[in-house]
Image: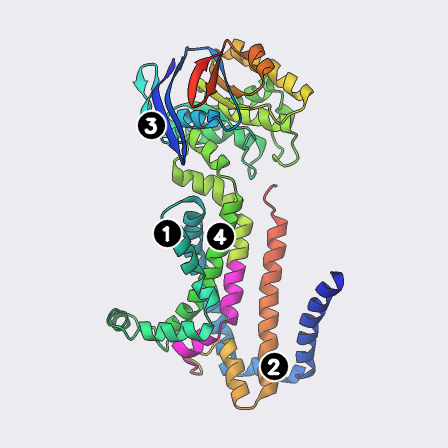
Amino acid sequence: MGVVGATYIILIVAMILADFTYTSTDHILEALGSKEIQYSIKLSLITSTITMVLSLVVGIPLGYFMARVNFRFKKVIDAILDIPIVLPPLVIGLSLLILFQTIPGQWIESQVRFTYTVYGVILAQFMVACAFAVRTMYVTFMQISDRQEQVGLTLGCNKKQAFFKILLPQARNGILTAGSLAWARALGEFGPILIFAGATRMRTEVLSTTVFLEMSVGNIEAAVAVSLIMIFAGFLVLFIVRIFGEKIPLTR
Amino acid sequence: MIELRDISIQQGNFLLSDINFSIEKGEYVVLMGKTGSGKTTIIEAICGLRSISGGQILVNGSDYTQLAPGDRGVGYVPQDGAVFSHMSVRENIQFALKLRKWNATEMKEQCEQLAKILSISHLLDRMPEGLSGGEIQRVALARALSFKPDFLCLDEPVSALDEETKENLYLLFEDLKKSMNITILHISHSTAEAKRLADRIIVLEDGKIRPY
């Protein structure tokens, strides 16, 4: 069993190390010096962070609702929530594009333009990332017994106070996991962004699109350099979240 | 005095109907019954945590049936204590007082007085993680008593504890009964425990209440 596990870990590390052999510090510095790539780094970080916040804003109440409330057709809603996880990313992008061609979609476009804009980048990231946040919060709330909330109610809490004062602090680690998953997922999102928001330099170009654009013009070294920047950023955030999560455990 | 009048509770395929009993002020009543007979359901209904399909819950003649759990003034100790795991013992005990906006000095006094009665003064600044089963139940009891309820519901509070800890808690319950003049409904499936503590024993069997 250990060998099987170790093989997978070695494969991950080997993959990243191989990337290093394909690029050099010069390439990375050159990539970091390019105005277009600086823009895409900035846009990636900003949009992923906004997507993470939006995913938590939706994921926490929806996860709570799914974990604590029983209703008819719950299984159907449960399955619908998994669609963005199951669907190929390209299909999500295409479906979004078609949605905004419909009459209600066109009306929204006339108010705020989503297709081929930064808003489109965020929406495309959100559609997938939020599903992961909802799923994580659903499982988190399922694992916390409602007994403590019930005692809180008898002590004088209303339902809102029981949620904010008793349940949410206990779900802290789940919230951190949901947030970091949504952020990482948003950072790595490519298919839906390419189709729905396009890949226009200095406008809707995020890091994953940069890799694609550089590769399509044969500049593999730059593509690899940007990939390494993404790996580094993603790893750093997940690592910080883990450390932060362990430092303030559930109990002081 | 608390009175349950023709209470019926539907829970899935499980039905409790025509539940009638009353508890006088200051009385210690033990409710017995087999596992799964619906004892906890009755306590939850009294605390307002489970909606009932018929009947009335009266406290000193006023109708509590539709009242929110927090407005009923019932202290509740569930089987596992359900102590708030993200708060210190002191924060647990002061939780209800904070909601009632007691001032800091009053809260501290009430908390320390209860901790003294329940012999948990040395635990006040500890987090619940690592406390023993008996200590957890004492904290849960202190928290339930903090806001000076007239009525206390204990749901198998000692069932998961060893004999010695059980004995200590029995002494504590007897002490509370004498010193606080509080009305208590205690769920148990131990006849010995019921005989020792109760002023009166009632039994829930086949969805109906009968005297022991």
Q: Which amino acid does label 4 sit on?
A: Met
Q: Residue furthest right?
A: A3
The verdict on residue A192 being magenta is yes
The image shows residue A207 at horizontal and vertical percentages of: 52, 76
Badge 4 density bin: few <14, some 14–19, many ≥20, Cα 10 Å: many
Point out the tag, 4 or 1, that comes first from the N-terminus.
1
Measure the alpha-carbon separation of dots 4 and 3.
31 Å
As helix, strand or loop, the secondary structure at mark 4 comes to helix
Circle 3 is placed at which residue position? B67
Q: Which amino acid does label 1 sit on?
A: Phe
Measure the alpha-carbon separation of dots 3 and 1.
31 Å
Measure the alpha-carbon separation of dots 2 and 4.
34 Å
Q: What residue type is labelled 3?
A: Leu
Q: Give the range drawn in magenta.
A: A179-199
The verdict on residue B162 being magenta is no
As helix, strand or loop, the secondary structure at mark 1 comes to loop
Of B208 and B105, which appears nearest the observer?
Answer: B208
Of A172 and A202, which appears nearest the observer?
Answer: A172
As helix, strand or loop, the secondary structure at mark 2 comes to helix
Asked if residue B150 shows in the view, the reply is no
Circle 1 is placed at which residue position? A73
Mark 3 vs mark 1: in front: 1
Label 3–label 2 contact, CB within 8 A:
no
Circle 4 is placed at which residue position? A137
Whether A216 is drawn above or below A72: the answer is: below
Q: Residue furthest bottom?
A: A218
Badge 2 density bin: few <14, some 14–19, many ≥20, Cα 10 Å: many
Residue occupying image coordinates x 70% and y 74%: A14
Disc sitting over residue A224 in the figure: 2
Measure the alpha-carbon separation of dots 3 and 2.
65 Å
Point out the tag, 2 or 4, that comes first from the N-terminus.
4
